[in-house]
Image (spheres, helix red, strand yellow):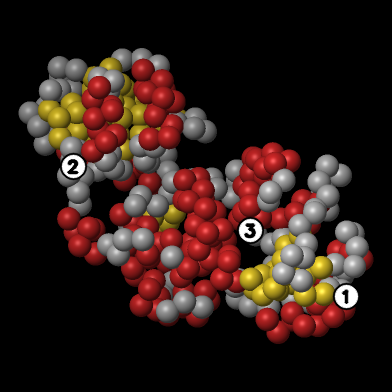
Amino acid sequence: MNMGKVQILKKALAHINAGAENFDIAESLEDDRSTIVRLVSEKQQFSALIQPWAPQQDFSVLVKKLKALSGKPVLLANFVNPVMAEKLKRQSIAFVDCVGNMNLNGTFVKGKKDTRDVQKRSRGRAFNPAGLRLIFAFFNEPGLLNASYRDIAAKVNVAVGSIGQVLDDLKISGYVAVENGEKYLINKKRLFERWVDAYLEKLRPKLLLGNFRAPSNDWWQTVDERNYVVQWGGEITVARQTPFLFPELTTVYCTRDDLDVFVEDCQLEEDIDGDVAIYQAFWLAQMAAEEVSPMIVYADLVDSVDPGNWEVAKTFYGEKIAEFLSEGV
């Protein structure tokens, strides 16, 4: 069981045992998708599903999973919001979260919040431009989460003062957990999906260096990117790996210093309606790598107007990002 789920189990069990009965952990069963814990007291027992968050969009799947458990099911989550609490109650699903919201043995509590975290939280900070840069860095270099704020700021090129606000927002939103003083990402799949949406809407447009028209559709095939500080975007990255995708609109990521030389050498002409979009790669100066991050590739494909690219993005997500998003300390 990863440390995020251990933390949920400890906090939820403390709220359960604050009542008249004391439950103990009888056994724990785990596979790639679920963690089931059998809780036993002198009078009753539960089969507890530990869920890092209670997703409304997957509500029917969640209910089906709970009702398939042997014994009386109970959901243990880091937080169950009031809307989800009512929905679970209508389905006669027992639940307990880390802050004391519950539907258990006739006790129904909703709307409780962790006041210490709420006081510290700067709402929305995690998904503003600085927060998006930080999330990107934490995904690609997990060790940064436990670096000093000064080191993080130097690596990611964000203000020191914004780092604590972003981390507080990620923590109360259920994306950062702390165990034995060490921070780590949890609920990575959901965080990744939110990052993609916010990146395409709030950050990438600010990074556009220009639109250009290429001399031919296959211009990129003759370019040796090793001669420049550049990385290919999602369409070209995947096109180089599969014959099923030929990019119509290509994205390139580079530094401002390399823009003019790259454009001239590739014979690109500035054109607002051109088929080549060049963006400033905010990560290149700090996190140089041979290939662009899977996060950028996936975001580029999702943003494509070609529905075929959406299917490629799903395949790429499954093959390339599953391990990238694996839960754990």
The answer to whether residue 9 is visible is: no
Position in image of residue 306 (x %, y %):
72, 46
Q: Residues within 10 Å of mark 3 (few under 14, many from 20)?
A: some
Image coords of residue 296 (percent x, y): 63, 58
Dot 2 corresponds to which residue? Answer: 111
**Residue type highlighted by circle 2:** Gly
- Looking at marks 3 and 2 on the same chain, the residue that comes earlier in the sequence is marked by 2
**CB of mark 3 within 8 Å of CB of mark 2?**
no
Mark 2 to mark 1 CA distance (whole Å): 60 Å
Please name the residue shown 43% across and 65% down the image.
128
149 with respect to 11 (left or right): right
- Label 2: how many residues lie within 10 Å, few (<14), some (14-19) or many (20+)? some
Q: Position of residue 308 (x, y in %)?
A: 73, 41
The answer to which of 107 and 40 lies nearer the viewer is 107
Which is nearer the N-term, disc 2 or disc 1? Answer: 2
Amino acid beneath label 1 = Gln
Q: Mark 3: which amino acid?
A: Ile
Which residue is denoted by mark 1 in the rendering?
267
Residue annotated with mark 3: 296
Q: Tell me what residue is drawn at x 19 percent, y 17 percent.
A: 44
Q: Are marks 2 and 1 in contact (CB under 8 Å)?
A: no
Of circles 2 and 1, the one toward us is: 1
Q: Quadrant of residue 283?
A: bottom right
User: In the visual, does 99 lie left or right of 48?
Assistant: left
- Residue furthest out toward the left: 20
